[in-house]
Image (cartoon, rainbow, N blue to C red):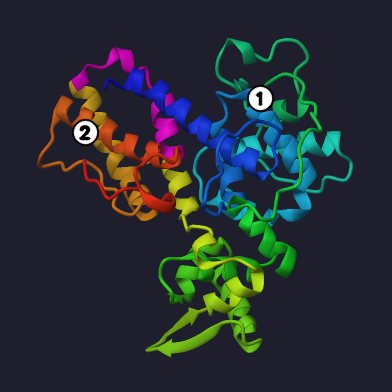
């Protein structure tokens, strides 16, 4: 499949995935079936800022949801996700926060755009329906983005705490919007039953020092176990006790996905597909470009999708590599759509 056609398919599938996630978290819209995985709210929110540039309605509904659910989210986690991203999500997020502060006096989040106001503003949304004609929103103009005036729809709802996708919010109701809630989530859901401090911190999206303090506090309270392994600390949790306490059977436990890694991979692919005029490149050159981006996103997707691997450079070259690449990314998209052929939300172990 050539990349101009693949770009359209990629955008449709990613947008459908985002609508489904946000509808399950309380955004106004139809999301379809329910997923069995637990979502990462701040990682999803940060990625959505840029992944919805082709879907203005979802962008605005997520902003509306943020205005309602700000107290259930961690600004520090959100900032940490954005700090790891070299793209434009931080600038877009700064515009969103400024617009929401104008619309909702009680909205407290404030972000500084990475760069000063641009000389030539860029359209926030893709396509002719979002040209920014008419009254332009000053909050977005201040960060160099053009769009029409933002107004809240006020259709959003609070997350349903019993939904697997909203599991993080259930723990936050119990433990607060704290490092401890994230540490418990990671230890409960990660496939490995024992993790090092650095591993927990990488998924918590908090500083390692803060995560170590939270884990020590949980261990002192007797709800997390700790052992030393050489110079490293290892942490575990009694999952049976926690699931019993939460009234969740082992079969109903939400599934683990490394969302920060997976969403970083999706963002990198989206930017790569968006920023090139693929019709001007031959299939051979498209294959060469695909080989280069696969090297950049392969680690992210491999870490988040068990069994996923990029095409083998030794078996594929040129146009043949392009076909293998689109098949490979297609497997990741089928996982997001819930039709990867794996049980309980896990992707099939397939190597293109």
The image quadrant where one finds the N terminus is top left
Please tell me which residue is depicted at 70% across the width and 29% down the height of the picture.
60
| Mark 1 surroundings within 10 Å by alpha-carbon count, few (fewer than 14), some (14 through 19), many (20 or more) | few
Q: Residue at x 49, y 80 (%)?
A: 235
Q: Is residue 128 visible?
A: yes
* Residue that appears at 71% across and 33% down: 28
| Corner quadrant of residue 129 | top right
Q: Is residue 344 above or below residue 216?
A: above
- Rendered view: 58 above or below 196: above
Q: Disc 1 marks which residue?
A: 57
Is residue 88 among what the camera can see?
A: no
In the image, 236 versus 29, the foreground residue is 29
From the viewer's perspective, tell me whether residue 10 is left or right of residue 166: left
Q: Secondary structure at mark 2?
A: helix
Q: Which residue is mark 2?
A: 324
Dot 1 or dot 2: first in sequence order is: 1
Give the quarter of the figure containing the C terminus. top left
Query: Residue at the spot x=79%, y=37% of the render?
Result: 100
Give the x, y percent position of residue 346: 39, 52
Element type where label 1 sits in the image: helix
Determine which quarter of the picture holds residue 321. top left
Disc 1/disc 2 C-alpha distance (Å): 33 Å
Q: Magenta span covers which residues? A: 266-283
Q: Which x, y percent locates residue 57?
A: 66, 24
Asked if the magenta segment contains residue 276, the reply would be yes
Q: Main secondary structure of the magenta part?
A: helix
In the rendered view, would you say 11 is above or below 302? Answer: above
Task: Give yes or no for residue 238 being in the magenta stretch.
Answer: no
124 lies left or right of 339: right
x and y percentages locating residue 223 in the rendered image = 61, 82
Residue situated furthest left in the rendering? 314
Work out whether residue 136 or residue 232 is closer to the camera in this orientation and state it. Answer: 232
């Amino acid at each position: 499949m050539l990349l101009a056609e693949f770009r359209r398919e990629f955008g449709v599938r990613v947008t459908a995935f985002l609508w489904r996630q946000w509808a399950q978290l309380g955004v106004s819209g139809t999301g379809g079936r329910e997923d069995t995985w637990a979502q990462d709210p701040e990682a999803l929110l940060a990625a959505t800022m840029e992944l919805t540039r082709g879907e203005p309605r979802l962008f605005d509904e997520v902003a509306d949801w943020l205005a309602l659910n700000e107290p259930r989210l961690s600004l520090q986690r959100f900032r940490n996700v954005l700090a790891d991203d070299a793209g434009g999500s931080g600038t877009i997020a700064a515009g969103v926060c400024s617009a929401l502060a104008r619309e909702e006096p009680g909205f407290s989040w404030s972000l500084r755009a990475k760069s000063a106001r641009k000389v030539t503003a860029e359209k926030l949304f893709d396509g002719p329906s979002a040209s920014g004609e008419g009254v332009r929103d000053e909050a977005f103009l201040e960060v160099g983005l053009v769009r029409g005036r933002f107004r809240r729809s006020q259709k959003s709802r609070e997350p349903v705490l019993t939904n697997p996708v909203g599991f993080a919010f259930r723990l936050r109701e119990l433990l607060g919007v704290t490092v401890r809630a994230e540490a418990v989530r990671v230890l409960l859901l990660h496939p490995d039953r024992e993790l090092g401090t650095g591993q927990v911190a990488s998924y918590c999206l908090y500083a390692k020092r803060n995560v170590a303090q939270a884990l020590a506090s949980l261990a002192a309270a007797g709800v997390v176990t700790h052992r030393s392994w050489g110079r490293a600390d290892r942490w575990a949790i009694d999952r049976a006790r926690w699931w019993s306490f939460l009234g969740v059977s082992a079969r109903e436990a939400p599934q683990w996905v490394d969302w920060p890694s997976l969403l970083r991979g999706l963002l990198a692919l989206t930017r790569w597909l968006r920023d090139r005029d693929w019709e001007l490149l031959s299939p051979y050159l498209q294959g060469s470009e695909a080989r280069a981006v696969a090297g950049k996103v392969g680690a992210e997707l491999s870490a988040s999708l068990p069994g996923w691997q990029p095409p083998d450079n030794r078996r594929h070259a040129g146009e043949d590599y392009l076909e293998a690449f689109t098949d490979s990314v297609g497997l990741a998209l089928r996982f997001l759509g819930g039709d990867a052929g794996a049980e309980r939300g896990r992707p099939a172990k397939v190597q293109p």
